[in-house]
Image (cartoon, rainbow, N blue to C red):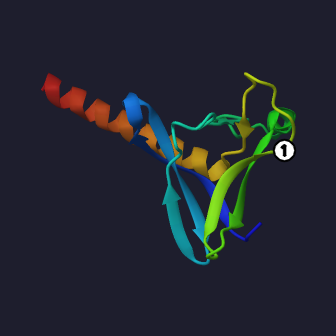
Amino acid sequence: GSSGRAGPGRRPVAGSQGLRAYEVQFIWQGHTLVSTPDLRAPAPMANDFCGPDRSASRLKRMAAERLNLRFQSVLDSWGRPFLFLLATRDIPAGGVGWLDYGDAYWENWWHHMRQEASQEASQEASQEA
């Protein structure tokens, strides 16, 4: 594959039929490329193997047994990156795709959750006044 780092971004985007997706940010040759999953694909979403509590390294190691997907990139015939999820082992029909979103994703997620809670509290306080 080509060199590059990929990971899900935090910003939700509107999809077809009211479904929500996440942007994927990909660093390639010093440029940040952003794409959204095609919600018409057979498996447009993947779950994080560990979830938002990244503090317990023992639990994280145990959960790592779930991992069956990873980001992969290849270059097309024009030298541009094509980013996709690669199954690292067989996933049975109806099975779940497990991916490591990365600690930075969850740090960003917690930051946004705290911001939203703070904004909601401020709005409630101003409505009560």
Q: Nearer the viewer, residue 105 or 128?
A: 105
Picture residue at 12% right of the left edge, 26% below the top: 129
Tell me the quarter of the picture where residue 115 sits. top left
On the image, the x and y values in percent for residue 76 come to 66, 69
Around disc 1, counting alpha carbons within 10 Å, would you say few (fewer than 14), some (14 to 19), or many (20 or more)?
Answer: few
Image check: 58 left or right of 33? right
Image check: 45 left or right of 85? left
> Of the residues shown, which amino acid type is indicated by label 1?
Thr
Q: Secondary structure beneath disc 1?
A: loop
On the image, the x and y values in percent for residue 29 come to 61, 78
Tell me the quarter of the picture where residue 98 sits. top right
Q: Nearer the viewer, residue 77 or 59?
A: 77
Picture residue at 51% right of the left edge, 37% below the top: 39
Image check: 117 left or right of 63? left
Indicate the quadrant containing the N terminus: top left, top right, bottom left or bottom right: bottom right
User: Where 87 sits versus 80, above or below?
Assistant: above
On the image, the x and y values in percent for residue 113 come to 45, 37
Mark 1 = which residue? 88
Image check: 127 left or right of 81? left
User: Where 56 sits versus 11, above or below?
Assistant: above
Residue farthest to the left, as pictured: 129
Tell me the quarter of the picture where residue 74 sits. bottom right
Picture residue at 30% right of the left edge, 37% below the top: 119
